Image (cartoon, rainbow, N blue to C red):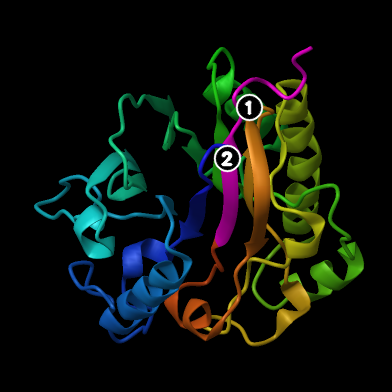
């Protein structure tokens, strides 16, 4: 029996920049948010940590943030995709290979994580994810803030539209993009053998946290982990606790898994 491992995917809201309007210096980290995030990750003890919105994960404009050091991981693969914006994959084990995918002002790491812009057309998001993993073999996860709602989630469109009126100039369009993106992305990945790695019992909303909005009428699950059949899922959930409510606008997602000795559909 293979040893089980843990993967955590976490959008860290602008690389832990202070969210207070009076403190917008790009060179500062909000230490309270960092400490809360470190407490979350320490409690989950992942073998692999995927970070979206990992600003300055490479040198840009004279600044760099070592997220591996920040979270005490010895190995990392990072990429910038739009000025300082980036993704980071941190690991307890050596990363033998990584590859960047670029889509105009967005990028993903083929390990695989991709954070599409919320306004990207649903059909283009689906094509992006296909491009990200098509032709890649072995045990593969697709994870991150996918900016889409799973078609398996129970979505109250009317409630979301009313909630979005508080912060979106076009709430109907914004909500419909999240819903349609989920249909397109999950369908495209299903054709490549990927399914939702988070068991139904753990599929809680991933945004918003109390940090940005105590009103949960706009709550939805847009952070996902999908896996192919070379991976056996032991358990998983969207993690909601006091520390995750302080660390970011997103709650992290965790799955515990094993690598199968052979594909699940092997005869």
Task: Decide: few, some or many residues near mark 2? Use Cα within 10 Å; few <14, some 14-19, many ≥20.
Answer: some
Label 1 vs 2, first from the N-terminus: 1
Q: Which residues are magenta?
A: 253-267
Question: Which disc is residue 32 wearing?
Answer: none
Alpha-carbon span between mark 1 and mark 2: 9 Å
Residue 162 falls inside the magenta stretch: no
Q: In the image as oriented, which residue stretches furthest toward the front?
A: 1
Disc 1 on helix, strand or loop? loop
Quadrant placement of the N terminus? top right
Residue at the image position 38 percent from the left and 70 percent from the top:
42
Position of 246 with respect to 186 (left or right) is left
Name the one closer to the observer, 35 or 41. 41
**Where's the C terminus, which quadrant?**
top right
The residue that appears at 50% across and 50% down in the rendered structure is 7
Tag in front: 1 or 2: 2
Horizontal side of 131 relative to 217 (left or right) equals left
Q: Is residue 255 above or below residue 138?
A: below
Residue underneath mark 1: 230
Q: Is residue 138 above or below residue 207?
A: above
> Residue 251: image x %, image y %?
56, 68
User: Quarter of the image holding residue 71?
Assistant: bottom left
Please rate how many residues cluster around mark 1, counting C-alpha atoms within 10 Å: few if below 14, some from 14 to 19, many from 20: many
> Which quadrant would residue 14 be assigned to in this image?
bottom left
Residue 6 in view, yes or no: yes
Q: Position of residue 260 (x, y in %)?
A: 61, 29
Residue 238, image x, y percentages: 64, 64
Given residues 267 and 214, the one toward you in this image is: 267
Name the residue located 63 percent from the left edge and 20 percent from the top edge. Answer: 262
Task: In the rendered view, tell whether residue 171 sits above or below residue 244.
Answer: above
Magenta span contains residue 258: yes
Query: Could you say whether the residue bearing mark 2 is in a helix, strand or loop?
Result: strand
> What residue sits right under mark 2 in the picture?
258
């Amino acid at each position: 029996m293979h040893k089980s491992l843990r993967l955590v995917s976490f959008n860290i809201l602008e690389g832990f920049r202070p969210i207070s309007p009076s403190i917008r210096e790009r060179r500062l980290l909000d230490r309270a948010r960092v400490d809360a995030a470190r407490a979350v990750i320490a409690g989950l003890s992942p073998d692999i940590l995927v970070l979206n919105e990992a600003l300055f994960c490479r040198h840009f404009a004279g600044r760099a943030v070592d997220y591996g050091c920040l979270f005490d991981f010895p190995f990392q693969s990072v990429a910038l995709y739009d000025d300082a914006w980036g993704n980071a994959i941190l690991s307890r084990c050596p990363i033998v290979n990584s590859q960047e995918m670029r889509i105009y002002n967005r990028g993903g790491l083929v390990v695989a994580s991709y954070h599409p812009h919320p306004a990207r057309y649903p059909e283009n998001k689906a094509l992006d994810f296909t491009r990200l993993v098509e032709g890649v073999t072995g045990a593969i996860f697709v994870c991150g803030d996918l900016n889409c709602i799973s078609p398996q989630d129970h979505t109250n469109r009317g409630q979301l539209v009313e909630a979005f009126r508080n912060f979106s100039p076009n709430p109907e369009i914004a909500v419909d993009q999240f819903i349609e993106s989920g249909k397109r992305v999950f369908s495209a990945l299903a054709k490549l053998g990927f399914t939702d790695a988070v068991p139904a019992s753990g599929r809680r909303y991933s945004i918003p946290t109390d940090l940005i909005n105590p009103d949960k009428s706009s709550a939805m699950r847009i952070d996902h982990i999908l896996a192919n059949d070379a991976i056996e899922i032991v358990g998983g959930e969207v993690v909601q606790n006091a520390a995750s409510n302080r660390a970011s606008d997103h709650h992290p997602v965790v799955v515990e898994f094993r690598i199968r000795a052979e594909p699940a559909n092997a005869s």
